[in-house]
Image (cartoon, rainbow, N blue to C red):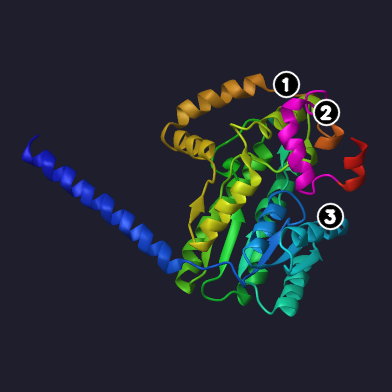
Amino acid sequence: MSSVTRSLLKNLSWSLLGGFAYSVLRDQFRYRPIKRSVAAITGGSRGLGLVLAKEFARQGASVALLARDNEELARAKKMIELAAPGAEVLTLECDCTKPHDVNQAVSSIIRYFGKIDIVVNNAGIISTSPIQNTTKKDFEDSLDIHFWAPYYMNRACLPHLQKGSRIVNISSIGGLVPVPHHAAYCTGKFALRGYSESLRLELMPLGIYVTTVCPGLMRTGSARNARVKGQFKKEHAWFSLMASAPLISMNADRAARKIISAIKTGKAETTVSTPSRILSLLHAHFPGIYADFGSVANWLLPNPTEDLRTTLEGKDAESVVSRSFLTALGQQAAERNNEIPPETDQMH
C-alpha cells in the first residue's frame, strides 16, 4: 500500500470518527425528554396518530387529539387512558384543512394545558388509483390535507412554541419516491416534505426542531379507510395485501417508538423502516433503474376504467382477497387502532 493511499485512508477514518462524534454530541445537546410535554396530534383519533398518542402518553406526555369525528375521538381517548392510566387527554373536533377550525383548536389547547411542546402533523388521506382515473380534485384534496393542513397547524402553533419545542411532519415513502397508482398522494407528501425541510432551516436558530418522518407501509389498518378509484376491488385488494405483508409493512407500535426517539433528539429526517431507506437510496442514486422497476410494478396493477367520478372507501370495496388470511395482520391492526367502529367490528 502506497503512502498516499495510507494517508487517504487515515484521513477518511478520522473524518468518519469525527462525523460520528459530532452526531452523538449533537443528539445529546438537543435531546428533550417526552415526560411532562404537551403533544398536539392531528389525525389523532385512529391509525398512526392514535398509536403515537398512546406512546406519548405511556412516556408521560399529555396529548391533544385533533380529528373530524367526535365518536372516533371519544373511543380514542378511552383507548389511550386504558393504555396509559392517568394520562391527560384532550379531544377536539377539527377539520385541519380549515384555518378557522385549526385556530380555535390551538386556542383550546393553550387554554386547557397552558402550552404546546410538540406538534405532530399526521392527518392524511391515502388514495390509490391509476393516473387515468385521478382528477384535479384528487390532487387538490391531497394538497389540502397533506400540505395546507400542516401549514395552518404550524402557523397557529408557532407563536406558542418555545426553545426546545418540536414540529413533526408525517410525510411518507411516497414523499421520497414516486409510487405507482398513488400520484395524488405522492404529490401532497412531496409538497409536505419540501415545506418541512425548509421550515427546519428557518426554525433551528430559534431552538425549534422540525423532524420530517417518511415511513413506508405500516400495519395501522388504514387500508379500509383509504380512497379507491378505478377497478375498486382490485385496487383495494392490492393495497390491503401490501399494507399487511410482514416483510413489506412495519408494525405500527414499533414505528411509533422510532418516531418518538427521533423527536427526542430533534432528528432532521427519519424513514423508520428498512424498505423505505432502500427505496430512497435506489431512487436517489439510480433514478433510471428505479423508474424501470416502478414501471414493471405499474404493469402488474389493475388497468384504469372510464369512471373518473366514483370514489369508494376501502371498506366499501372489499373482496375475497382483501378479507382473506393474507390480510389478517392488517385487519387485526384496524381493530386495535380504532379504524373499525365497534358495531362494524361485531358484524364480521
**Which element type, helix, strand or loop, lies under badge 1?**
loop
Would you say 203 lies left or right of 47 here?
A: left
Tell which tag, 2 or 3, sits nearer the viewer.
3
Decide: few, some or many residues near mark 3? Use Cα within 10 Å; few <14, some 14-19, many ≥20.
Answer: some
- The residue pinned by badge 3 equals 72
Q: Earlier in the sequence, mark 3 or mark 1?
A: 3
Find residue 56 and report its horizontal and vertical position in percent. 64, 61
Find residue 97 and report its horizontal and vertical position in percent. 75, 58
Q: Amino acid at mark 1?
A: Asn
Q: Which mark is residue 307?
A: 2
- The residue pinned by badge 1 equals 303
The foreground one among 126 and 97 is 126
Magenta stretch: includes residue 323:
yes
Would you say 51 lies left or right of 339 here?
A: left
Q: Amino acid at mark 3?
A: Glu
Q: Amino acid at mark 2?
A: Asp
Q: From the viewer's perspective, is residue 322 above or below residue 135?
A: above
Q: From the viewer's perspective, is residue 35 above or below residue 122?
A: below
The foreground one among 263 and 119 is 263
In space, the residues marked 2 and 3 are separated at their CA atoms by: 32 Å
Would you say 8 lies left or right of 26 here?
A: left
Residue pictured at 53% horizontal, 36% vertical = 275
Q: Which mark is residue 267?
A: none
Question: What range of the chain is rendered magenta?
Answer: 319-340
Residue pictured at 59% horizontal, 74% vertical = 161
In space, the residues marked 1 and 2 are separated at their CA atoms by: 12 Å
Q: From the viewer's perspective, is residue 63 above or below residue 313?
A: below
User: The C terminus appears in which quarter of the rendering?
Assistant: top right
Tell which tag, 1 or 2, sits nearer the viewer.
1
